Image: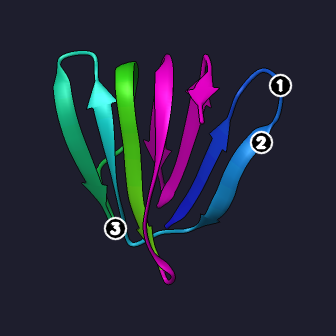
Amino acid sequence: MLLEIVTPDKKVFQGEVSEATFPGALGAFQVLTNHAPIVSALAKGPVSFTTTEGKQSFQVEGGVVEVKQNTIVVLAEKVVD
C-alpha cells in the first residue's frame, strides 16, 4: 500500500507500507492491504506503520485519513518530532 502523510507545511512521509495504525477519533484502528474505503477523523496520537526497513511512527496532533484502493492519505494538522 502507498502511505502519504502531509501537513500544511510539508510532505512528512511517502512510501510503501504493509500495515498502518491510526489514532481514530473513536479509537485506534489498523489498515491492511485491500482495506475497504474509509474516511476518518484522527485524534492526537501515534501514526505507526511498517515499511521494508521496519516499524516507524509519527505523533500527529489530529487530522483526517482517507483509505481508498490501497492508497492511504493522512492530512495531519501537525506532526510532532
Disc 3 versus disc 2: distance between alpha carbons?
22 Å
**N-term-proximal mark, 1 vs 3:** 1
Task: State yes or no: discs 1 and 3 in contact (Cβ < 8 Å).
Answer: no
Disc 1 versus disc 2: distance between alpha carbons?
7 Å
Q: What residue would you read off at disc 1?
A: 9
Q: Nearer the viewer, residue 70 or 29?
A: 29
Residue shown at the point (20%, 33%) measured from the top left: 28
Whether residue 78 sits left or right of residue 12 in the image: it is: left
What percent of the width, then of the height, locates residue 15?
A: 64, 66
Q: What residue would you read off at disc 2?
A: 11
Work out which quarter of the rendered image holds the C terminus and state it: top right
Q: Amino acid at mark 3?
A: Thr
| Residue 11 position by quadrant | top right
- Looking at the rendered structure, the secondary structure element under dot 2 is strand
Q: Amino acid at mark 1?
A: Asp
Question: In the rendered structure, which segment of residues is drawn in magenta?
Answer: 52-81
Residue shown at the point (51%, 81%) measured from the top left: 53
- Looking at the rendered structure, the secondary structure element under dot 3 is loop
Decide whether residue 61 is among the magenta residues.
yes
Circle 3 packing at 10 Å, graded few (<14), some (14-19), many (20+), is some
As drawn, 39 above or below 62: below
What percent of the width, then of the height, locates residue 44?
A: 38, 18
Q: Amino acid at mark 2?
A: Lys
- Mark linked to residue 73: none
Q: What residue would you read off at disc 3?
A: 33
Q: Nearer the viewer, residue 20 or 73?
A: 20
Task: State yes or no: discs 1 and 2 in contact (Cβ < 8 Å).
Answer: no
**N-term-proximal mark, 3 vs 2:** 2
What percent of the width, then of the height, locates residue 50?
A: 40, 68
Whether residue 55 sits left or right of residue 27 in the image: it is: right
Coloring basis for residues:
rainbow
As drawn, 4 above or below 1: above
